[in-house]
Image (cartoon, helix red, strand yellow):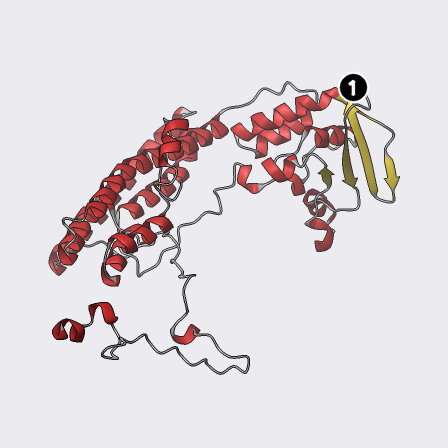
Amino acid sequence: MTDGDAMRQAIDEVFPNCQHRVCGWHVARNACAHINGPKKSSAFRSFIFDHIDEDKFDECWNEMIKQHGLEDNVWVNMIREKLFDLFPQIDRALMRLRNNFFTDEYASNTKSPVILSHMKALEKHASSIYTYRIYCDITKEINDSIKYSHFAPWNEENEVEYVLTEYDSPYKKTVSVFYYRDRIDFQQVVEDGDWDSSKHNLPVLSCECKLLQNKGIPCCHMFYVMKVENITKIPESLIFKRWTKSAADDVRIHLQPDDDCSKSVDIARFASLSAECNYICHRGSQTEEGFNLIKRELNILRNTLQGLDDEFRNNCNKNGDDSSTKSQILKDPNVVKTKGRPTGPTAPTTPAGKPQKRKRPNQCRICHISGHDWRNCPKRESDS
């Protein structure tokens, strides 16, 4: 993604299969150069930054073109073709992300991994909390920990430093792992009833390789120290919630009464309901009793929803309104203007807190009237 034509030829030559896109800020800036008038530019920028439903985009675009007389503007027509070429690609990307999400969720809820490593307790604990894809990465780190050995640990009060090296090549490359025994983990808090907020938020283990900070999972060096210290469960301070099976449990769709119903809301509702029903369908399909129970309840629910739909249609026909009820939707944040001289209540002030005097607008040097300059002054044209 670049600022346009400056690198287009180089990108086409070096990356022939790459989709070259122009960022929204540069498109808005170029609009000022190709579209004359602030109202026209503002109307065009709304199609870049505002939320517009896909079904209404073509209608709103044609209305804007007709209102501002941009039918013959070559640059505007070129941007429209690029936008319509981009929308299907965004839809395919979203479909691919949703498919990957549901595939991973199904694998995490249905697959039972076979424990094969030498640290069965830690691997079993990892399989119960992490998603299947992250669990596979965890098992790789556990298996890699077997090739390490350590020198005599360095102890200072409750802090222990382990210097690890590969078994067949000592002193060639060393990694330091710090184990803090005084930092209380969440599992110990539950078991002992002790609580110290200053120690609870700190990691029990830290490693120089920084894999935990970069990828979000414990490294093989940490698993080696867990084996030496006889830790049978991964400490809570080393578990990132975004990689766990319960990561989506706290995600909720917040309704806002001032949002209009659109196709995006329907997609968000469908995804939320699918996530809730996925586990129920999986459990019900494992036994004959569960299957019959879910089928019976689904028939009741289907009839109930059909009655609600008929009632909603009747109310809409009586009121003459086909619009849906107000719903919530997660939209893009408001675009904040960060450049240019501030105006209105945000105008600059003096150190004493008083507002500065505003600069007088530029005036024509012929007629001394603002809004134009001497080159297109009406008085000059009339005199000539």
- List x then y, in percent, for residue 269: 33, 45
In the figure, is residue 172 to the left or right of 144?
right
Residue 377 occupies quadrant: bottom left
- List x then y, in percent, for residue 271: 36, 40
- Quick check: 370 above or below 232? below
In this figure, which residue is indicated by the disc labeled 1? Answer: 167
Quarter of the C terminus within the rendering: bottom left
Mark 1 lies on a secondary structure that is loop
Front residue of 338/3: it is 3
Is residue 25 visible in the rendered image? The answer is yes
Residue 158 occupies quadrant: top right
The residue shown at (22%, 47%) is: 76
- List x then y, in percent, for residue 46: 28, 55
Front residue of 325/348: it is 348
In the figure, is residue 114 to the left or right of 235?
left
- List x then y, in percent, for residue 14: 41, 27
The residue shown at (23%, 49%) is: 308
Q: Amino acid at mark 1?
A: Tyr
Residue extending furthest toward the front: 384
Front residue of 378/198: it is 378
Quarter of the N terminus within the rendering: top left
Residue 174 occupies quadrant: top right
Is residue 195 visible in the rendered image? The answer is no
Q: How many marks?
A: 1
How dense is the environment of label 1, judged by Cα within 10 Å: few (below 14), some, or many (20 and up)? few
